Amino acid sequence: MDYFTIEWVSVVLISSLAIISPGPDFAMVSKIAVSKGRPAGVWCAVGIGMGVTVHLTYTLLGFGLLLSQQVWLLNTLKIIGASYLIWLGLQAFWPDIKARFFPSPTIEQAVKPKPRWMQLSQSPFFTGFLCNALNPKTMLFIVALYSQMVSPDTSIAIELSYGAFIATAHVVWFALIASLFTGGHFKQHLARFKRIIECCCGSVMILFGVKMLA
């Protein structure tokens, strides 16, 4: 087995293990798929994959190692990413909070369309994209993978193929998770526990956010 084959196997194996390990992406895709349906969950998975390409891009351009050594940047990303996770997690509890503490909206308020920026920020794709693009752990993982596992002699075409695999694997895995939670067999049994699952996933995202801050 030549060095190139060993490198490919190493990248695929390490990336796959990192992707399937439980994390905020898993909780977020599960919550969106259960609450909004399979298409929304799949779009969230696509957003996660696109978020990964942000880290891949600056790493392939040679800025990854430099950025990873900037403590202020990592701390800023941690604060922003953690705050975003906590905000997403709290959204799972918002319907109950709104029903308890805020009056029911009038008909005019209920049918009034939301501003374009609010629709975009709440879209499953944008949610998945931001969740991964703001995750400093993903940043450090991509930088470590390319700096430690990929040889300096590896061509840019091969490095791009590694990046394409990592981004595609994210999309495929989380799309499978979304499909699993919205499949006919699971859907029948999970319908009764929809709010519980949403709140559990929200709690997990809040805990990940708090852990990231800590």
Image (tube, helix red, strand yellow):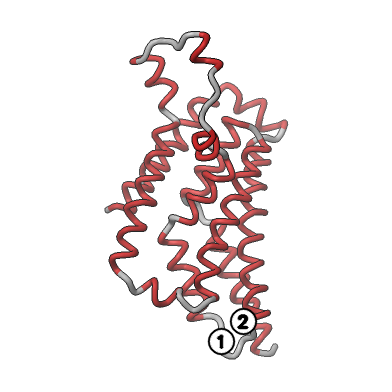
Write the residue at 43% across / 39% down: 88
Write the residue at 53% across / 19% down: 112
Write the residue at 39% across / 34% down: 90
Give the image quarter of residue 135. bottom left
Name the one closer to the observer, 26 or 143: 143
Q: Position of residue 128 (x, y in %)?
A: 54, 47
| Rendered image: mark on residue 137 | none
Residue 187 vs 147, above or below: the answer is: above
Say which quadrant the N terminus sits in: bottom right
Residue density around tag 1, few if under 14, some if 14–19, many if 20 or more, within 10 Å: few
Residue 46 vs 199, above or below: the answer is: below
Left or right for 91, reference 37: left
Give the image quarter of residue 150. bottom right
State the residue lying farthest toward the right: 184
Residue at mark 2: 7
N-terminal of the two: label 2 or label 1? 2
Kind of residue at badge 2:
Glu
Contact, CB < 8 Å: mark 2 with mark 1? yes
Residue 24 vs 34, above or below: the answer is: below
Residue at mark 1: 151
